[in-house]
Image (cartoon, rainbow, N blue to C red):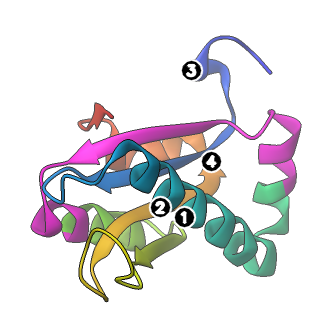
């Protein structure tokens, strides 16, 4: 894998809500849920994207949004762009109420298409 993210052909982006004030471990678990579920989704519909992502070293970038409206908007923009979007809804066993959308994954997909949707977001 290249050390330069702009050299990736494919990547996965996970977008996390900051307003929930989840602990570090909770965020890590939610991001992991999103990453795994998104790969399963892409494996069913875009095997070529998945193969390219594996070849690139499975690059992932974790970004943040202030709250639910922004998460919804990013997901909608990605969907309109034809990108696979996977939203994680928490079971409510620990820090947030059941059914809360904690984060979403976009891709794995072509990096330039994801960047067109998420390029204005900040790293987590």
Q: Which residue is mark 3?
A: 6
> How far apart in space, not on screen, are marks 2 and 1 (Cα)?
6 Å
In this rendering, position of residue 124 left or right of residue 112: left
Asked if the residues shown at circle 1 and circle 4 are in contact, with their CB atoms under 8 angstroms apart, the answer is no
Q: Mark 1 or mark 3: which is in front?
A: 1
Name the residue furthest top.
3
Residue at horizontal 62%, vertical 47%?
Answer: 110
Q: Residues within 10 Å of mark 1 (few under 14, many from 20)?
A: many
Q: Could you tell me residue 111's position as x and y percent?
A: 57, 40
Q: Which residue is mark 1?
A: 34
Q: Say which of marks 1 and 4 sits in front.
A: 1
Q: Read off the residue under disc 2.
A: 30
Alpha carbon distance from label 1 to label 3:
23 Å
Residue sitting nearer the eye, 113 or 64? 64
- Highlighted magenta segment, given as a residue range: 51-72
Secondary structure found at label 2: helix
Nearer to us in this view, 35 or 57: 35
SS of the residue under disc 3: helix
Gap in angstroms between the C-alphas marked 2 and 4? 23 Å
Which element carries disc 1, helix, strand or loop?
helix
In front of the other: label 2 or label 3?
2
Depth check: 27 or 34 in front? 27
Q: Secondary structure at mark 4?
A: strand
Which of the marked residues, 2 or 3, is nearer the chain's N terminus? 3
Answer left or right for 123 relative to 13.
left
Quadrant location of residue 67?
bottom left
Badge 2 vs badge 4, beta-carbon distance below 8 Å: no
Eyeballing the image, is 40 above or below 111?
below
Which of these two is toward me, 114 or 59? 59
Magenta span includes 56: yes
Question: Badges 2 and 1: C-beta atoms under 8 Å apart?
Answer: yes
């Amino acid at each position: 894998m290249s050390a330069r993210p702009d050299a990736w052909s494919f990547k996965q982006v996970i977008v996390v809500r900051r307003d929930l004030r989840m602990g570090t471990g909770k965020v890590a678990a939610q991001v992991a849920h999103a990453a795994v579920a998104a790969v399963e989704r892409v494996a069913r519909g875009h095997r070529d994207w998945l193969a390219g992502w594996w070849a690139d070293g499975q690059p992932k970038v974790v970004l943040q949004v202030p709250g639910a409206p922004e998460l919804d908007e990013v997901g909608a923009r990605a969907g309109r762009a034809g990108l696979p979007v996977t939203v994680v809804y928490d079971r409510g066993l620990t820090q947030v109420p059941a059914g809360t959308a904690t984060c979403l994954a976009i891709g794995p997909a072509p990096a330039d298409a994801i960047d067109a949707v998420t390029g204005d977001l900040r790293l987590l």
